[in-house]
Amino acid sequence: MKRRTFIKKALLATGGVITAPYIIPSGRLFATTNAPMAEHVVFVLFAGGVRQQESVLKRYLADSQKIDIEGNIMYNLLEGDAPPLKIAYGTTLPGGQKGGQPISKILSSSLQKQGTLFQELRYSKGGTGHYGGLSAGVSGHYGLTQGLRQRPLHPTIFEYARRFGGFKATDTWFVGNGISGSVPLLNHSNYDGFGSKYGGNFIAPNITFGAEKYIKGFKIYHPDDELDPIHKMQAFLNQSFQLQGGELVSLGNTEEEREKIKDFIRKTFDKLEKQQIAFPPVTDNGDNVTIGFATEVLKYFKPKITVVNIGAVDVCHGNFTSYLEALHRADHGVGHLWNVIQNQIPEMSGKTALIIMPEHGRNIAHNPITDENDWFAYDHSDSNSRRIFAQMVGPGIPSDLLVGSESNPVGDASDIVPTIADLLGFKADVMASGLIDPTARSLFDRI
Amino acid sequence: MKNIWPVFLAVLTLAGCKDKDYIYQVNEVNILPNNADKDKEKTNEQYINIVYANLYQKALSPDKLVDLSNVIQSIGDKQVAYEIIISKMMNDPLVKLPTVQEMNADPGKFITNTYKRFFVREPTQAEKTFFLNFIKSHPNLTPEHIYFAFATSSEYYYY
């Protein structure tokens, strides 16, 4: 064989090996897609409807209460100085002004400096309701006919990840801030070909670990002497019944994974009792308790995809001061989360991408409700509630990059699903599915 | 008069040869297993109410029902949630369990009673045989293990 022919054939063979379809652990044959940038992705749904004015635009009271004081109350996420006056969002020192002590910054360098900030995205379709927003965030699809008490109409990122990425059930988690507002339904759709068997695990830790008297100290059966015969009896009992089609909707956790979830719950109760949960320094609201438990999920399972939903900011419907407090604490919680990932979970440090996006914004015009500071409250229904931002930080993500502006919106709420798929290496499958919003693109493709 | 006899005999003979239409009064029956008509999945509330009644032999209070339903909703994998709650209940001395001696004294009766208690039906002969052999071959097996398996089986999630 001539040297040139040999090289040509060798190159063709190598290319063929690289691009040839391969079989993922679940047995599905699929074509190779993009190279992953990260091994893990944490997506924070932040944090119950956030106005651009008090977050990315850092206008504090200037655009909401006609008080000319600007400043940044999210200094773990964003660059900028804190407001100089009328501090009402912090903690309260004994004998001090209510909320007058800002919470100390956790991160030495803001996420804005460490990563990429899309300053102005659009929630472009459908009403700006919480469940619609959360559903669009996890499915990349605006369910215009999406109702409450109904699973997302199109597949979620968990289902794409498990079907196309071959991840197991305990590789994917939705950590909810509670069980109201249909939040427990966001871990999978019922879409044909996807559905529960590709769903993510769900936990609402504030409820689970608040139910000490009902589950703390639950019995752990001996794996060989007790669990083995129990599983054999279950298998026999299930066998004939399942032939009739009767089976509990399953997330596809294996028996081993189920035992791991039980072990996680048992150990987390123990850690809670010993005060060893990695809660943020300030945990005076439910969101930061949720974030503390989310860090335990990350430590135990090291999931490939974790979605954390926090929502205390929604208090803005009736109390603007509490909204500022919740926004400041959400920033504190996310800073803590990133800090724990980098410093307490070696398996995820340097290999994890963090994405932050509110499920929707809030109105430009206030409602008639005032709080103890005579500040007006805000709902979410007008065009201003379609204005949101997104941040991402981690391996392969440009640092200190600002994309878009108030006058030049770049990106869409439906972009997060293809972005996560891009980070983990199955973007082509998601885009080819035809099931996300037709305009959705990976945020990397918008830079 | 003599001529009537042959005619009479011929009529009698022909009448005797006529086939009778027998109609057996048996209705058509589809043969299905005992559990085939359980096609509705229990809600979390139904499940927890019924399992509590089965284990404690008394009704669950409304506040406990709400709390336990919330716990189930807070855990995505329902099998995990149910198993945790039931194994916690098994720690409670108030749960009404037969003793190991009672089970071993008359395993056949124990199996029948367990099927009636949890599945509201008699076991089939095959089911009875399986459990008789299983109890015999697993000397460390207790009624708690068997109750746990029944309360977390697919058939129990349906009615």
Image: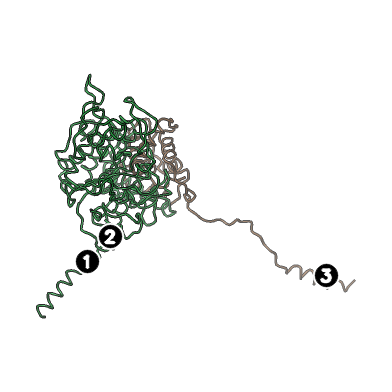
Chain colours: A green, B brown
Label of residue A428 in the image: 2
Compared with residue A65, is residue A228 higher up or lower down, i.e. above or below?
below
Residue at 27% across / 56% down in the picture?
A: A166
User: Mark 2 or mark 1: which is in front?
Assistant: 2
Depth order, front residue of A339/A29: A339
The quarter of the displayed image where residue B113 is located: top left
Q: Position of residue A266 (x, y in %)?
A: 26, 37
Q: Residues within 10 Å of mark 2 (few under 14, many from 20)?
A: some
- Residue located farthest toward the left when viewing the structure as drawn: A3
Say left or right for A136 vs A91.
right
User: At numbered mark 1, what does the secondary structure look like: helix, strand or loop?
Assistant: helix
Name which of mark 2 and mark 1 comes first in the sequence: 1
User: How far is the residue under mark 3 from the one under mark 2?
Assistant: 96 Å
**Measured from the top left, where is residue B73 in percent x and y?**
37, 40
**In the drawing, what numbered circle is on residue A19?**
1
Chain designation of label 3: B
State if disc 1 and disc 3 touch (CB < 8 Å). no
From the top left corner, tell me how far across and down residue A203 is, in percent.
31, 41
SS at mark 3 in the image: helix
